[in-house]
């Protein structure tokens, strides 16, 4: 009779790389990391009486639309006609500091700056409207060619008709047709961060739609300089019998979309 050989079932050995062992190690590592994090937090907060809570530098933000107006003239000077931001007949005024006007022209920005210490410029809206019937009056003007606007951080300090042509040629200038009463508008999307100069304080500042700028330098309200430059390829022409040497031809309505924060205790 053949003896039956009983096979002894060998127990399976657990591999150290089995999924249960790996999960256990991961859990242990997470628990150790949590313990380290708690110790780190306790060490950092030794001098505190309670668990710290968030504290805001900005506080609640407030949005405002700040308005500015800029006039544009046709000027008949002794040296020849031109477009200008001013009514003087010496030479064309080609640059208008619109952030300076934002502070000084009307009181809305100043009122906000007395309450809040920080301001952020998100967007600039510009609308042009013809503001004089003299353009269509044959007794005043013969021709009113298109004019051009360029937004820039660099002003044209001494205006000439040759420089006005260069502004018209700039890649970022926009054209305004003077032969229609239909208003024209543009949006300037302010970059997240840009560096420019405040010439009143002779210093350099950043600003942008992601930058909070102090509304005051000592006790003076300020903002980095931003300009509109004025140009044209050709120039307005007056009749020989025109009773006026300076005619208001249009107006820019500029609206700054601003946010204010950081309440001031005064």
Image (spheres, rainbow, N blue to C red):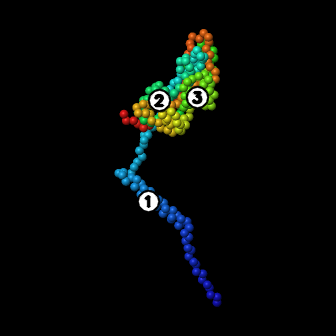
Query: Which residue lies most toward the top here?
Result: 241
Residue located 51% across and 27% down the image: 97
Residue 96, image x and y in percent?
53, 26
| Label 1 vs 2, first from the N-terminus | 1
The answer to which of 178 and 166 lies nearer the viewer is: 166
Residue 111, image x and y in percent?
42, 29
Pointer 3 local density, CA inside 10 Å: few below 14, some 14–19, many at least 20: many
Can you tell which mark lies on residue 35? 1
Q: Nearer the viewer, mark 1 or mark 2?
A: 2
Give the quarter of the figure containing the C terminus. Answer: top left
The answer to which of 221 and 179 lies nearer the viewer is: 221
| Label 1 vs 3, first from the N-terminus | 1
The answer to which of 76 and 15 lies nearer the viewer is: 76
Residue 131, image x and y in percent?
55, 19
Give the quarter of the figure containing the N terminus. Answer: bottom right
Q: Nearer the viewer, mark 1 or mark 3?
A: 3
Q: CA distance from mark 1 to mark 2?
A: 56 Å
The answer to which of 124 and 1 lies nearer the viewer is: 124
Pointer 1 local density, CA inside 10 Å: few below 14, some 14–19, many at least 20: few
Residue located 55% across and 24% down the image: 158
Task: Give the image quarter of residue 231.
Answer: top right
Residue 159, image x and y in percent?
57, 23
- Residue occupied by mark 3: 150
Q: Secondary structure at mark 1?
A: helix
């Amino acid at each position: 009779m053949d003896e039956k050989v009983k096979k002894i079932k060998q127990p399976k050995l657990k591999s150290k790389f089995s999924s249960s062992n790996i999960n256990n190690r991961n859990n242990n590592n997470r628990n150790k990391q949590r313990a380290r994090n708690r110790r780190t937090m306790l060490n950092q907060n030794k001098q505190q009486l309670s668990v710290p809570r968030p504290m805001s530098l900005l506080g609640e933000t407030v949005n405002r639309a700040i308005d500015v107006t800029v006039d544009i003239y046709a000027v008949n000077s002794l040296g020849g006609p031109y477009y200008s931001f001013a009514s003087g007949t010496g030479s064309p005024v080609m640059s208008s500091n619109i952030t300076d006007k934002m502070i000084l022209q009307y009181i809305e920005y100043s009122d906000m700056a007395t309450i809040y210490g920080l301001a952020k410029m998100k967007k600039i809206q510009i609308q042009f409207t013809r503001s004089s019937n003299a353009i269509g009056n044959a007794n005043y003007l013969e021709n009113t060619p298109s004019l051009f606007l360029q937004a820039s951080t660099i002003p044209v300090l001494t205006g000439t008709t040759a420089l006005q042509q260069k502004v018209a040629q700039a890649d970022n200038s926009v054209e305004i047709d003077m032969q229609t009463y239909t208003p024209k508008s543009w949006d300037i999307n302010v970059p997240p961060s840009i560096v420019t100069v405040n010439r009143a304080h002779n210093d350099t500042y950043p600003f942008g739609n992601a930058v909070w700028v102090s509304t005051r330098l000592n006790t003076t309200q300020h903002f980095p300089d931003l300009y509109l430059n004025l140009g044209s390829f050709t120039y307005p022409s007056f009749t020989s019998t025109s009773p006026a040497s300076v005619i208001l031809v249009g107006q820019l309505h500029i609206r700054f979309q601003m946010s204010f924060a950081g309440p001031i205790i005064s």
